[in-house]
Image (spheres, helix red, strand yellow):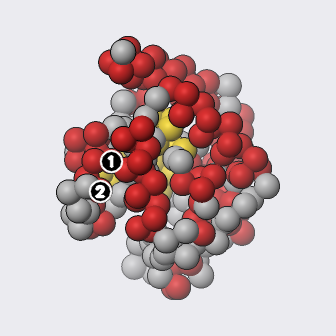
């Protein structure tokens, strides 16, 4: 039963990611132009993350920060990085639009539409045995943490939510997360990051 549900999940992932890339192309092109005009630097921000089976992959986002003098784009994990978020970047983050290029990761099979968030390598290495359960599923573009507090809840609490998601996963849970995440993103709830 679970294997069948996972196969359906993967099929839905492929359909939804293709829809984002094809039907959403005009929006993606507009965002790319705005990012390019907002500050010098590349359109995309590519960063190594840890996915299913603890395998690293390169996650793609629209760039939301001005490139630093040393050429680094930053991760917003410090006050200095946060200060470099552009106006366009702030808008994209608040509405989750910077995440749309991850449709490419989903199409490649590295991510899913719904799933636990993919951690940075250094953070993943510090996970406890229980927390490593998140690596049993593909990381998601949208996660259960979106409607449970988004960026306003501490990182440890977010990880616990991801573990619970993996332990209780079903297609119905994915649908519930998607439906409840839409108003959270549209009304820009819990956009302040408290975890760094």
Q: Position of residue 107 (x, y in %)?
A: 44, 28
Residue closer to the observer: 91 or 71: 91
Give residue 126's quadrant in the image: bottom left
Residue drawn where x is 46% and y is 61% of the image: 158
| Residue 131: image tag | 2
Q: From the viewer's perspective, is residue 52 above or below residue 61?
A: above
Q: How many marks?
A: 2
Q: Secondary structure at mark 2?
A: helix
For the N terminus, the image quarter is top left
1 and 2 marks in contact (CB < 8 Å)? yes
Q: Is residue 59 visible?
A: no
Q: From the viewer's perspective, is residue 21 above or below residue 192?
A: above
Counting other residues with Cα less than 10 Å from the Cα at mark 1, is it few (<14), some (14-19), or many (20 or more)? many
Q: Position of residue 63 (x, y in %)?
A: 55, 59
Q: Position of residue 114 (x, y in %)?
A: 50, 38
Q: From the viewer's perspective, is residue 185 above or below residue 85?
A: above
* 86 with respect to 163 (left or right): right
Residue drawn where x is 41% and y is 48% of the image: 164
Q: Residue furthest right?
A: 187
- Which residue was labeled with disc 1? 134
Residue drawn where x is 26% and y is 62% of the image: 127
Q: Position of residue 94 (x, y in %)?
A: 69, 60
* 7 with respect to 174 (left or right): left
Residue drawn where x is 40% and y is 59% of the image: 159
């Amino acid at each position: 039963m679970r294997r069948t549900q996972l196969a359906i999940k993967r099929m839905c992932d492929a359909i939804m990611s293709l829809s984002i890339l094809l039907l959403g192309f005009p929006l993606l092109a507009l965002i790319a132009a705005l990012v390019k005009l907002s500050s010098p630097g590349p359109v995309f921000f590519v960063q190594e993350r840890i996915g299913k089976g603890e395998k690293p992959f390169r996650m793609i986002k629209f760039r939301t920060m001005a490139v630093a003098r040393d050429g680094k784009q930053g991760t917003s994990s410090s006050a200095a990085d946060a200060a470099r978020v552009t106006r366009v970047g702030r808008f994209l983050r608040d509405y989750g639009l910077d995440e749309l290029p991850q449709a490419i990761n989903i199409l490649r099979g590295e991510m899913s539409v719904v799933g636990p968030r993919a951690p940075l390598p250094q953070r993943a290495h510090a996970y406890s045995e229980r927390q490593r359960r998140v690596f049993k599923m593909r990381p998601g573009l949208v996660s259960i943490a979106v409607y449970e507090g988004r960026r306003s809840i501490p990182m440890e609490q977010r990880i616990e939510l991801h573990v619970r998601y993996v332990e209780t996963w079903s297609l119905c849970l994915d649908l519930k997360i998607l439906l409840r995440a839409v108003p959270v993103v549209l009304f820009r709830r819990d956009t302040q990051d408290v975890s760094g």
